Every structure is written in C-alpha cells, then in structure tokens.
Image (spheres, grey):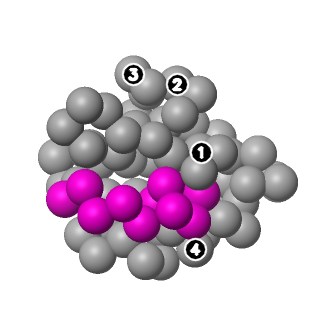
C-alpha cells in the first residue's frame, strides 16, 4: 500500500538526515531545504513501496517534523 508523504519546507533546518536515510526520495534546494528528488516543486507525493522503509526512518529521525506521513 502506498503512503502519502508531505514535506513542510519552512520547518526544515537543513540537518541532512532525510537525504541520508532516503536518498532516492529526498534532496535539497540551494539553501539546504528539503524537497522531493523526483518532484522538486511538490509538497506531497505517494511513496513507492520499495522506498517506504527508508522514508519512515527519515520521518522518525527528523528533529523538526518537516516530514509528515499518512496512510
């Protein structure tokens, strides 16, 4: 089952943990703020099953909750 992932760029402190745990999903803009690597202008996207475990790790480790998950 796909999970919907949302990002809140204004919360991001550019710590780098999301791209460390889920590099296929997350990337950064020129200021180090989180964005989706495949859809840089999107604030939400469905996460492929193969990437869900990595995204959950990134979600759990984000210190400012800039990553949100929904079922």
Rate crowding at label 2 as few (under 14), some (14 to 19) or many (20 or more) other CA atoms within 10 Å: few
Q: Is residue 5 left or right of residue 32?
A: right
Q: Element at badge 1?
A: loop
Report x, y in % for residue 12: 23, 55
Report x, y in % for residue 22: 59, 57
Say if 62 sits above or below 40 in the image. below
Residue range (magenta)? 13-22
Q: Which residue is mark 3?
A: 41
In 3D space, how far apart are the residues under numbered discs 3 and 4 (Cα atoms)? 23 Å
Are circles 2 and 3 on residues that touch, CB within 8 Å? Answer: yes
Q: Element at badge 2?
A: loop
In 3D space, how far apart are the residues under numbered discs 2 and 3 (Cα atoms)? 6 Å
Are circles 4 and 2 on residues that touch, CB within 8 Å? Answer: no
Name which of mark 3 and mark 4 comes first in the sequence.
3
Say if 60 sits above or below 10 in the image. below
Q: Is residue 29 left or right of residue 17?
A: left
**Quarter of the N terminus within the rendering:** bottom right
Rate crowding at label 4 as few (under 14), some (14 to 19) or many (20 or more) other CA atoms within 10 Å: some
Q: Which residue is mark 2?
A: 39
Q: Which residue is mark 4?
A: 57
- Quarter-wise, where is residue 42 in the image? top left
Rate crowding at label 1 as few (under 14), some (14 to 19) or many (20 or more) other CA atoms within 10 Å: many
Residue 64, label in figure = none
**Quarter of the C terminus within the rendering:** bottom right
Residue 25, label in figure = 1
In 3D space, how far apart are the residues under numbered discs 4 and 2 (Cα atoms)? 20 Å
Q: Nearer the viewer, residue 17 or 6?
A: 17
Rate crowding at label 3 as few (under 14), some (14 to 19) or many (20 or more) other CA atoms within 10 Å: few
């Amino acid at each position: 089952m796909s999970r919907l992932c949302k990002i809140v760029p204004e919360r991001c402190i550019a710590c780098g943990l999301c791209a460390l745990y889920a590099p296929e999903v997350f990337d950064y803009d020129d200021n180090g703020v989180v964005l989706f690597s495949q859809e840089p202008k999107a604030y939400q996207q469905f996460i492929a099953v193969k990437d869900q475990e990595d995204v959950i790790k990134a979600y759990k480790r984000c210190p400012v909750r800039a990553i949100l998950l929904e079922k």
